[in-house]
Amino acid sequence: MRDNSALGNGGHGGAALLEFQKVNTYYGDLHVLKDVDYVIGKGEIVCLLGGNASGKSTTMKTIMGVVRPQRGEVMYDGEPIGKMSTNDRVRRGIAPVLEARRLFPRMTVYENLELGAYTQPRGAQFDQDLERVYGLFPRVKERRDQIAGTLSGGEQQMVAIGRALMARPRLICMDEPSMGLSPLFVEQVFDIIQTINKQGVTIFMVEQNASMALSIAHRAYVLQTGQVVLSGTAAEMQANEMIKQAYLGEMKVEGAAP
Amino acid sequence: MTAYDLALQQLINGFSLGSMYALLALGFTLVYGILELINFSHFNVFMVGSFVAFYVLEGFGVVGQNTIMTGLPLVGVLLAALAVTMLVTGGIGVGIERLLLRPLRAVKGPAAMILTIGVSYVLFNIVILGAGADSKNFPNPLPPIVFTFENAVLRMREILIWVISLLLMGGLTYFVGYTKLGKAMRATAQDPEAARMMGIDVDRVIMMAFFLGSALAGAGGMIFGLYYNYTSFIIGFSAGLRAFTAAVLGGIGNVPGAMLGGLLIGLIEAYSGAFIATAWTDVIIFSLLVLVLVFRPNGLLGRMAPNKS
C-alpha cells in the first residue's frame, strides 16, 4: 500500500515507526513543508540534511506536535497522530533532543532528568532508566547536583540526551546534536547515539555535520526549501555528487566560483 | 514609650505587614515568572479575599471584635474562613486566566496586561455594588491575650498572622521546590517550549500559577482585615502597589525574592511610619524601589523570567 519507491527505499526493512504522508505545514502564509514524505523504520538511524530554512526544524516541531500540518498525516506506529497533543506523543514514546540543548538552566542536572521522565510513573522503572543514563554518561552522574546552566556545552548535550532517554522513548528526534561542540565531543556524542540505537531506540536526526551523521546513519533525506529532493541509504548519499559538493565539503573550486 | 520600645513594636508590626505583602507579592511573581505578565487584577483579588473572609467569619456569628472564641471552635472557624477565602480567590484567579487571559495568550503586546486592569475595575465595582462603599468592621474572634516585651505589645492576631504566613510560604516553597507539578512550574518558567516538549501540560501549569497566586492573595486579604480591624473596597490599590513593589524589589519571577521583598516593604512601612511620618512612607518605599532598579535592575535576588530563545 505504501509507495516507498520514490524514496529510494534504501532497505529500511521492517515496519515503519514514523511516517510523514504528503505533509504540508504553514507558518501563516509561509508554506514551509511541501508534500513531504518520510518513512522512519523501527530501529533505524535516519538523518535529515538540508540548508538553512529548508524546513528541518519545522519537521522536528511537526513530529512533536508543536506545529500542526495543514494537510497530510503523520503516522506513528501505524496510527495517525496529527491531532495528538505533545504530551500524549511524549507519553507514547517520542522524545526530543532540542536544538542548542535547551536544558532548564536554573535546575539541577537531576531535576532535568526527572523532567525528562515527566510522563512516566515513578518507581523501579525510573530508577532503572536513571541507571541507564548514568551508565551511558558517568559524567552526568558526577554532575547530578550541579545547576545545568553551569555545565560545559558537551556536558549539557549529554544531559539533553539523557533527559530524552528518561522518557523511555521508542523514537528520539535530535535537532543538531553536534552544534557548538568541540570535535572530540562530537565523536563521543555520535558514539553514544549509535549505542542508544543498538539498544533499540529509533533515531531521527537533523544534522549540519553531514559526514559525521552519514557515518552512523542507515538512511538519509535531503530537504530543500521544504521539499524532499533526495533520499537513500547513507552509502548512496556519501557517493552522491550533489551531496559531496553541498554537504561533505568536497566542493570543487573552479575559477572564482564559490 | 522609649525609642527602643517603639523599635521593638515596629519590628512586630513590620513583620505582620511584611507577611501580608509577601503573600500578595508571590502572586505577582508566580504569574510574571511564567507569562511575563503583570497581573493588575491581583490587586482586587486580594480585596475580594478580604470580603470573603469577612462574610465567612460573620456567617459563623463572629461580629466585630466582641465575639471571642477559644480552643477548637476558634481554630475551626479561622481555618474554615482561611480555606474558603483561598478557594474562592483561587477560583477567581483561575476564572480570569481560563476565560479572559487564555484567549489573549497568542496576542503580543500589552493587551493582556490592559485586560487585567479592566478586570481589576470590574471586581472593584462588583464589591461596591454588592457590599456597599462603607468600610466594614472586620470580625476577629481571637481572645485578647497580650504578651508584653519591655513596653512592646504582641497580640494574638500577630501570632496568627505569622503562623498563617509561615505555613503558606513554607508550603509554597515545598511545592515549587520538591513536587512534580512544582518542578514543572519552574521548568515552564525557564523555558516554556522545552517544558512542553517534556510532555508538561503548560496550560495546566499556568492555571496552577494563577490558582496559587490568587489563593495566597486571598489569605493576604484575610490578614489585612485581622491586622487593621476593617476592610473596604478601596484596600486593593495601596496594598497591591506595595506588594508589586516588593516583588520587583526582590526580583520579579523569583519566589524567595518576593518573600524577602514583602518583608522589607513591611518593615520599612512600619519604621518610617513610627520614626519619620506616615506621610513619608510611600515616598520612602518608592524611592527605594527606584534606587534598587537603578543599581540592581534585576532586584535583590535576581529576576527569573523565561529564557528568550
Image: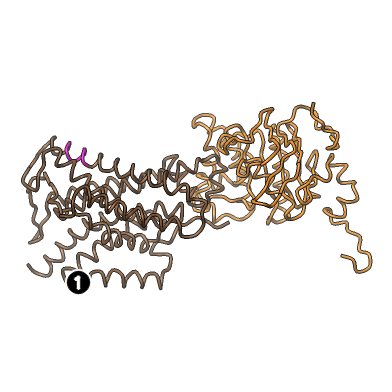
Chain colours: A orange, B brown
Report x, y in % for residue B290.
36, 72
Q: Is residue A242 left or right of residue A155?
A: right
Report x, y in % for residue A42.
73, 31
In the figure, residue A132 lies in which quadrant? top right
Report x, y in % for residue A184.
72, 53
* Residue nearest the observer in this picture, B301 or B91: B91
* Chain under disc 1: B
**Residue drawn at the location 66% of the way across and 42% of the way down:** A62
* Residue nearest the observer in this picture, B200 or A121: B200
Q: Is residue B295 left or right of residue B260?
A: right
Quarter in which the C terminus of chain A is drawn:
bottom right
B74 falls in the magenta region: no
Picture layout, residue B147 above or below residue A64: below
Picture layout, residue A122 above or below residue B235: above
**Residue drawn at the location 22% of the way across and 72% of the way down:** B280
B78 falls in the magenta region: yes
Report x, y in % for residue B174.
37, 44
Q: Examine the rendering and report whether any part of residue A131 can be seen.
A: no
Secondary structure at numbered mark 1 = helix
Instruction: Say which residue label 1 marks.
Output: B279
Picture layout, residue B63 above or below residue A15: below
User: What secondary structure characterizes most of the magenta part?
Assistant: helix
Quarter in which the N terminus of chain A is drawn:
top right
Q: Examine the rendering and report whether any part of residue B250 can be seen.
A: yes
> Could you classify mark 1 by the number of other residues whose Cα lies within 10 Å: few (under 14), some (14-19), or many (20 or more)?
few
For the view shown, which residue lies furthest in the front direction? Answer: B129
For the view shown, which residue lies furthest in the right direction? Answer: A255
Q: Which residues are magenta?
A: B76-81
Picture layout, residue A69 above or below residue A123: below
* Residue nearest the observer in this picture, B2 or A65: A65
**Residue drawn at the location 80% of the way across and 42% of the way down:** A220
* Residue nearest the observer in this picture, A85 or A242: A85
